[in-house]
Amino acid sequence: MDATAVNLLLFIFSVLLLYKGSDILVEGTSKTALRMGISPLVISLTIVAYGTSSPELATSSIASLQSHSSFSLGNVIGSCLANMLLVMGISSFVKPISVSIGIIRRELPILVIATILLILSSLTGYLTASTGVLFLFAFIIYLIFFVRVARKERMKVKLFEGRDGKTWKYIALIILGLISVILGAHLLVESSIYFADLFGVPEFIIAISMVAIGTSLPELAVSVTASLKGESDISLGNLLGSNVFNILLILGICSIINPIFVDQKSMLSEIFLLAVTLSLFPIFYTGRRISRIEGLLLVIIYALYLYWLKVF
């Protein structure tokens, strides 16, 4: 078997490993949190968002450690766009998604602020270690703010009765999920870089398209499932929360590991991400739902963006 076939199999296997690993991670973390009496609101919009963003975190961090910083930036921007256009589009096409006023007034504006912060920080041409510290500081502020909001809105949580000794099993799931995600991320980076070199395609393009779609599979699985179950807040909260995690936490860590160069295509993609995020305000406000037609439109815009990447 030649190297191309081997790397193609590794790429497919790594995506499956990331998908299943993040699923196990979310399961273990959510069950552990429930046993600790944490509000379902916190679980769905922070822990689940963290779990579905873990492939991007692992992939981008490993790429930065290997001095492939443009790969890290492409993966984050691509994943954010895939979440907003591809995943949200498919989820709402499967079943129209209702939008709560809290999402419009709180989560979406926070994501807009995070995206603007990314663009302003990129104007110098580099995301440096000082930028990373700023992003992580903003991320901590975000978590503190969200926990305070969650306390005000918290619902009564029914704790598991008794101590049946199963907590350790959920902790084991967390460890297994993390191992799977890290291993899958390593294989994904290695195989993707091989194909970038093979076809003479810049790493940024591979990361923002093929890799980004692969690492967004957990968000797709969670959001579509939540949409089918009528859990619209979980579906949208997962996507918006994941994007905040991607920008502030992942790019914060990666830029501290290694400075990230921001070229023209990266900058234009960041501006496009802001435009997409701002366009969600009128979509969310019209009938307070995302219709099937709007979902299809989002997917078409994503396809046109991928075509632009190819010809630019």
Image (cartoon, helix red, strand yellow):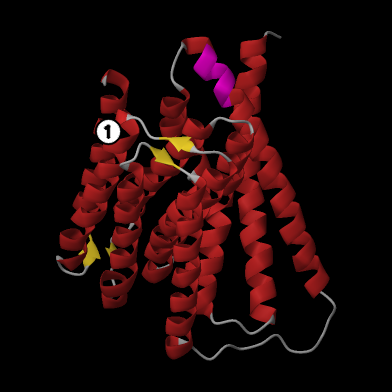
The percent position of residue 203, horizontal first and vertical second, equals: 48, 24
Q: Taking the image as drawn, is residue 225 in sight? A: yes
Q: Identify the secondary structure beneath mark 1.
A: helix
Q: Residue at x 26, y 50 (%)?
A: 274
Identify the amino acid type marked 1.
Answer: Tyr
* Residue ID for mark 1: 305
* Magenta part, dominant SS: helix
On whether residue 209 falls in the magenta region, the answer is no
The N terminus: image quadrant: top right
Q: On the picture, is 214 further left or further right than 87?
A: right
Q: Residue at x 27, y 19 (%)?
A: 311
Q: Residue at x 33, y 66 (%)?
A: 110
* Vertical position of residue 241 compared to residue 218: above or below: below
On whether residue 193 falls in the magenta region, the answer is yes
Q: On the picture, is 105 further left or further right than 135?
A: left
Q: Taking the image as drawn, is residue 213 in sight? A: no
Q: Residue furthest right?
A: 165
Q: Residue furthest top?
A: 2
The C terminus: image quadrant: top left
User: Which residues lie in the magenta part?
Assistant: 192-197
The percent position of residue 124, horizontal first and vertical second, equals: 34, 40
* Vertical position of residue 309 compared to residue 42: above or below: above
* Vertical position of residue 227 compared to residue 163: above or below: above
How many marks are shown on the rendered structure?
1
The percent position of residue 224, horizontal first and vertical second, equals: 43, 55
Image-quadrant location for residue 62? top right
The percent position of residue 240, horizontal first and vertical second, equals: 38, 60
* Vertical position of residue 91 compared to residue 152: above or below: above
